[in-house]
Image: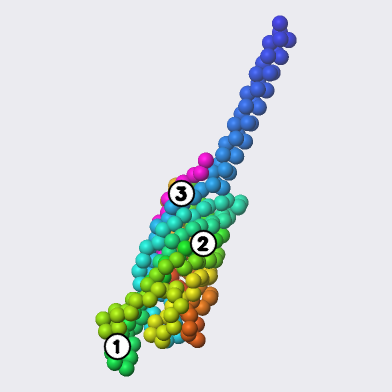
């Protein structure tokens, strides 16, 4: 009887121990799984412009929206690809023509694919600061170049093929680099300030190089994918 009781107690202790270990590894896997499958819905305010040797580009403001994936690499490093709808552009300074002065506003709407590597440093259990650096690739979707002076009344597609000495049209793609930083709260709320600049010549039919530039302030909210 005593041997049976001892055997039963040993089996009970063993089963409890195995169950505890199983739950521990299960929780670890769930935490890793969640950290590898987070996605953030992001909305941002942008101030975009362009580099210009003739110093004629005035920044304009816009709003962007998209999603950002957050994949844990280890040692507080994260890979963050995304998919964003990003308006860019600028307004030109007034220029003097033979008959009148005129200026125009260029709007370009891109589907942008950013890819950054981020490092997150925990300040407390609920607060992390982060920095990121990476690149982006953009495909031009649509846009308009609109003349402000009623005398000219010109409107062109931003990514069209018209040749004119008055207004620049853009290539239908763009690439560049970006960096940023910010804070995460409760592993849910993400606030980031960022800067990006193209390294390709964005305009057609002009010899002087020009690249897109943009400052952004964005707010994101993370969701776990089960």
The residues bearing labels 1 and 2 have C-alpha atoms spaced at a distance of 38 Å
The residues bearing labels 3 and 1 have C-alpha atoms spaced at a distance of 49 Å
Residue 124 visible somewhere in the drawing: no
**Image coords of residue 144 (percent x, y):** 37, 72
**Residue lying at 70% horizontally and 13% vertically, measured from the top left:** 6
**Residue lying at 61% horizontally and 29% vertically, measured from the top left:** 20
- Pointer 1: residues within 10 angstroms few (<14), some, or many (20+)? few
Residue at the front extreme? 162
In the picture of the structure, the residue carrying the numbered disc 2 is 113
Tell me the SS state at disc 3. strand
In the picture of the structure, the residue carrying the numbered disc 1 is 101
Q: Quadrant of residue 51?
A: bottom left
**Image coords of residue 28 (percent x, y):** 59, 39
Relative placement, left or right, of 114 versus 10 is left
Residue at the top extreme? 1
Point out which mark residue 222 bears: 3
Q: Disc 1, disc 2: CB below 8 Å?
A: no
- Which label lies toward us, 2 or 3? 2
**Image coords of residue 109 (percent x, y):** 42, 67
* Nearer to me, 11 or 137: 137
User: In the image, is residue 179 part of the stretch drawn in magenta?
Assistant: no
Magenta extent: 216-226
Sequence-wise, which precedes: disc 2 or disc 3?
2
The residues bearing labels 2 and 3 have C-alpha atoms spaced at a distance of 18 Å
Predominant SS of the magenta segment: strand
161, above or below 127, in the image: below
Residue 25 visible somewhere in the drawing: yes
- Pointer 2: residues within 10 angstroms few (<14), some, or many (20+)? many
């Amino acid at each position: 009887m005593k041997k049976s009781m001892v055997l039963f107690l040993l089996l009970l202790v063993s089963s409890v121990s195995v169950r505890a270990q199983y739950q521990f590894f299960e929780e670890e896997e769930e935490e890793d799984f969640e950290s590898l499958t987070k996605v953030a819905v992001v909305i941002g305010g942008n101030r975009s412009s362009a580099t210009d040797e003739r110093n004629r580009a005035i920044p304009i403001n816009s709003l962007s929206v998209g999603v950002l994936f957050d994949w844990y690499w280890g040692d507080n490093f994260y890979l963050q690809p995304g998919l964003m709808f990003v308006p860019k552009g600028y307004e030109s300074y007034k220029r003097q023509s033979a008959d009148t002065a005129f200026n125009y506003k260029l709007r370009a709407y891109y589907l942008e694919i950013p890819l950054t590597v981020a490092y997150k440093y925990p300040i407390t259990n609920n607060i992390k600061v982060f920095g990121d650096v990476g690149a982006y690739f953009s495909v031009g979707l649509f846009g308009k170049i609109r003349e402000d002076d009623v005398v000219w009344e010109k409107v062109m597609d931003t990514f069209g093929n018209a040749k004119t000495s008055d207004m620049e049209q853009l290539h239908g793609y763009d690439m560049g680099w970006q960096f940023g930083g910010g804070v995460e709260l409760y592993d849910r709320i993400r606030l980031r300030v960022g800067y990006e600049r193209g390294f390709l010549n964005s305009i057609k039919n002009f010899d002087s190089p020009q690249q897109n530039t943009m400052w952004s302030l964005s707010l994101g909210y993370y969701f776990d994918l089960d």
